[in-house]
Amino acid sequence: MATEGGGKEMNEIKTQFTTREGLYKLLPHSEYSRPNRVPFNSQGSNPVRVSFVNLNDQSGNGDRLCFNVGRELYFYIYKGVRKAADLSKPIDKRIYKGTQPTCHDFNHLTATAESVSLLVGFSAGQVQLIDPIKKETSKLFNEERLIDKARVTCVKWVPGSESLFLVAHSSGNMYLYNVEHTCGTTAPHYQLLKQGESFAVHTCKSKSTRNPLLKWTVGEGALSEFAFSPDGKFLACVSQDGFLRVFNFDSVELHGTMKSYFGGLLCVCWSPDGKYIVTGGEDDLVTVWSFVDCRVIARGHGHKSWVSVVAFDPYTTSVEESDPMEFSGSDEDFQDLLHFGRDRANSTQSRLSKRNSTDSRPVSVTYRFGSVGQDTQLCLWDLTEDILFPHQPLSRARTHTNVMNATSPPAGSNGNSVTTPGNSVPPPLPRSNSLPHSAVSNAGSKSSVMDGAIASGVSKFATLSLHDRKERHHEKDHKRNHSMGHISSKSSDKLNLVTKTKTDPAKTLGTPLCPRMEDVPLLEPLICKKIAHERLTVLIFLEDCIVTACQEGFICTWGRPGKVGLLSSPNQASSPGGTVV
């Protein structure tokens, strides 16, 4: 686990960090930005976003990068850890008037060295389909804003489709489009297809087929982001009303829901095998939700402000028949990442099934995911088997110091039951460690409550494991008023004071929809580093590196362990990213 520096180093921007697999290092010559390298004045602008595509060209350097900064959109060759970025030669650059690009997505299925389909969503509600290689503006959807006038918050191609794409707006609506169809010259008329709890889906009623094919109305308030499952069958949506909703995309059925601790949810992602979903939002937490069990299995607290992006790292996520503390990397190439490696998911699934067998050699499961936030910090998290399989013996759970309330139900109890606080729990840990007291599982019988001595012992252990960790919560006041730092573990009853949605939090708090803080394990980040001057808006895991970006418009490449020596160092002027070694 990486150790934090102390004292005056607190506000320095970090250019490297260490995890169990080695040293990650910022590569200053691989930084992408606007060609003039001037920090963008981000006040009032939409978040900087980054999209990647691999064109499979013969040169061996098929990676392409698209990013938006203010009114501008750039398309570059991405050289990653191999060569320095050449910002003087963007393949394509566009400057828009009257509207700003907000999000974009490449069609990986149809991309070639000669042509690539890029969807771009805009602040006024339109969606543009362009080909940055051929420099063609193919089509403009919702051009007259007859379908929706609100800002586009997320746009994605439907997995496995060459022509279908889904668009979410801040109005709370999503629309399914086909690139082959027109949008019509009049406002669409809709017919109800299916209605459920807090959602409705309509079809477009017209004589000839036109866009949109479907209109989804989801929750209350803006839709922040959506993500398709690795197999493309399910759709996870997060909204400003604080709800995660997971749908079967084809049958338009609601699979499950989850409620944030408070405030809106801003980001969502799936584990590479589709078993877990992680969300982040205005409660400063990352929340891990089990797709199979439809319940919260852990929360993570490391950020001091809103969490803007969450993402799994498929190259560090491992399922190995080995000692839990050994690290096992992955050799999958970039294409496997793009297609989410279905073979990998299947092998992971088969190995996970061995986890519950009677083999003497247990399977070690570790999912790595990351998060970035408005606090300018990058956090990395490990989701380990003592969280995934909570029926292990207590001694085994103690080996993972990043899990802070590592109590487990007794060996005979059902690990899938929704946890509830026990009667004999010790007093909470000091708030400087930001850890609620240990949770105790109740599998539906009074006898499953642990005695206070064991629980106290675990609390002491959790405190000891944090002994070398500096107390970050005295660093500075939180940027937001309603933050985890201002809520004690006992103040959950006052939640209605800070929740702005129409949902009564008193009705959801303490239920499986939104467990209390002490009811689920609280994860501790492996590393938590300040890496930018402005709020962070991008986190993408590639095979050789991690890519981050901040609102100033700087896209940074962090070389993975063993990959940092590949880059030659030309005598370039130092970038204005404000990096301090």
Image: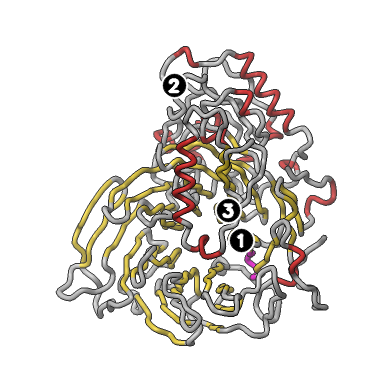
Residue span colored magenta? 549-553
Q: Dot 2 lies on which element?
A: loop
Dot 1: element: loop
Tell me: residue 107, above or below residue 196.
below
Q: Quadrant of residue 127?
A: bottom left
Name the residue at 17% across, 72% down: 206
Residue drawn 43% across the image and 85% down it? 137
Mark 2 or mark 3, which has the lower sequence index?
3
Residue tagged 2: 443
412 relative position to 542: left or right: left
- The residue identified by callout 1 is 543
| Residue 270 image point, x, y percent | 47, 51
Q: CA distance from mark 1 to mark 2?
A: 41 Å
Dominant SS type (magenta): loop
- In front here: 197 or 14? 14
- At horizontal 58% and vertical 18% (from top left) the residue drawn is 425
Q: How is the image coloured?
A: secondary structure
Query: Hey, what amino acid is under mark 3?
Result: Asp
Residue 387 belongs to the span the image colors magenta: no
Disc marking residue 313: 3
Q: Nearer the viewer, mark 1 or mark 2?
A: 1
* Residue nearest the observer in this picture, 10 or 229: 229
